[in-house]
Structures are given as structure tokens and as C-alpha cells.
Image: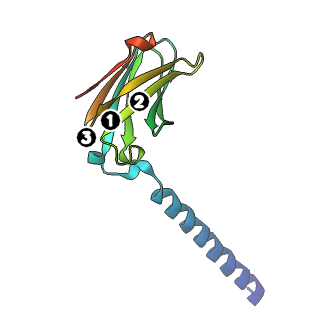
């Protein structure tokens, strides 16, 4: 192998190593689900709607989607503590994916590592949350 081919091969290997390291470091540094389990909030969502519902955490008036629960089903979602900031309460919202009906749930106090039970009723006024 000549000097030019060896130099190109070495340069390519170095560039790929740097790019891979940068991508890996960025992904893990901003991964909200990398927090320890005791700092995450589990939400058991019971969807009584025939439509799938997107579930959001509302932080400072801005909804942040945490998952989707299919119609007439139950699913456990995990909310990273970083989604809550320094708040000691959580406000959730459900929204149907087709008709876009919103179910706003009043804020409830919480502690990291606890489980919330969210029922999304067939009508917004039938939705409720409890802290277990």
C-alpha cells in the first residue's frame, strides 16, 4: 500500500471515530429517560375513548408529549423528572388524535418515584387523576 492510500485510510478512520463519538455523546447527554428510576414519574393511563389519545405534560403552559394510548386500553407511560423541572406538581393533558378534543387535567402534587393514575373519560369532564 502506498503512502497516499495509507494517509486516506487513516484520515477516514479518524473522521468516522470523531463523528461517532460526537453523536453518541450528544444523544446520551440529552436523553431525558437516562435519569434513575426513582426520579421518574410513572403514569398509568386508562383511556375510555374509542380514539387514541396523546398524553402531554403541561410545563409553563407548553405541552410536551410523553406518549400515546390507544383507544379503550391501558398503558403505563414514564415521565422523566427533567420534563417537570423544579415543580412539585404535574399538570397533564390528553388530546384525541383525530377530533383533537382536549382533556385538561388539574395539576396534582407529586413526588419522584411515585405512580399517577390517569383516567381519560369518554367526555373531558369525566377525566380524572389520582396520586398513588
Q: Which residue is mark 2?
A: 92
Within 10 angstroms of label 3, few (less than 14), some, or many (20 or more) residues? some
Image point 35% across, 51% down: which residue?
Answer: 35
Q: What residue appears at the point 35 percent right and 35 percent down from the top-left corner?
A: 90
Q: What kind of element bears circle 2? A: strand
Residue 42, disc: 1
Residues at marks 2 and 1, CA–CA distance in whole angstroms: 12 Å
Mark 1 or mark 3: whose residue is earlier in sequence: 1
Crowd class of label 2 (few under 14; some 14 to 19; many from 20; radius 10 Å) = many
Using the numbered discs, state the Cα–Cα distance from disc 2 to disc 3 in whole angstroms: 15 Å
Contact? badges 1 and 3 (CB < 8 Å)? no
x, y (%) of residue 94?
A: 46, 24
Residue 40, image quadrant = top left
Quarter the N terminus occupies: bottom right
Q: What quarter of the picture does the C terminus occupy?
A: top left
**Residue receiving disc 3:** 111
Residue 129 appears in which quarter of the rendering? top left
Foreground: 67 or 112?
112
Q: Is residue 60 above or below residue 70?
A: below
Task: Report the front residue among 48 and 84.
Answer: 84
Residue 117, percent across and down? Answer: 30, 25
Farthest residue to the bottom: give it. Answer: 3
Amino acid at each position: 500500500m502506498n503512502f497516499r492510500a495509507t494517509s486516506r485510510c487513516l484520515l477516514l478512520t479518524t473522521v468516522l471515530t470523531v463523528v461517532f463519538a460526537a453523536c453518541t455523546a450528544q444523544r446520551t447527554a440529552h436523553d431525558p429517560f437516562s435519569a434513575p428510576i426513582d426520579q421518574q414519574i410513572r403514569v398509568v393511563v386508562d383511556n375510555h375513548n374509542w380514539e387514541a389519545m396523546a398524553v402531554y405534560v403541561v410545563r409553563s403552559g407548553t405541552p410536551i408529549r410523553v406518549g400515546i394510548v390507544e383507544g379503550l386500553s391501558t398503558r403505563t407511560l414514564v415521565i422523566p423528572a427533567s420534563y417537570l423541572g423544579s415543580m412539585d406538581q404535574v399538570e397533564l393533558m390528553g388530546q384525541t388524535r383525530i377530533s383533537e378534543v382536549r382533556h385538561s387535567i388539574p395539576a396534582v402534587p407529586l413526588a419522584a418515584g411515585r405512580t399517577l393514575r390517569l383516567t381519560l373519560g369518554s367526555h373531558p369532564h369525566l377525566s380524572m387523576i389520582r396520586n398513588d
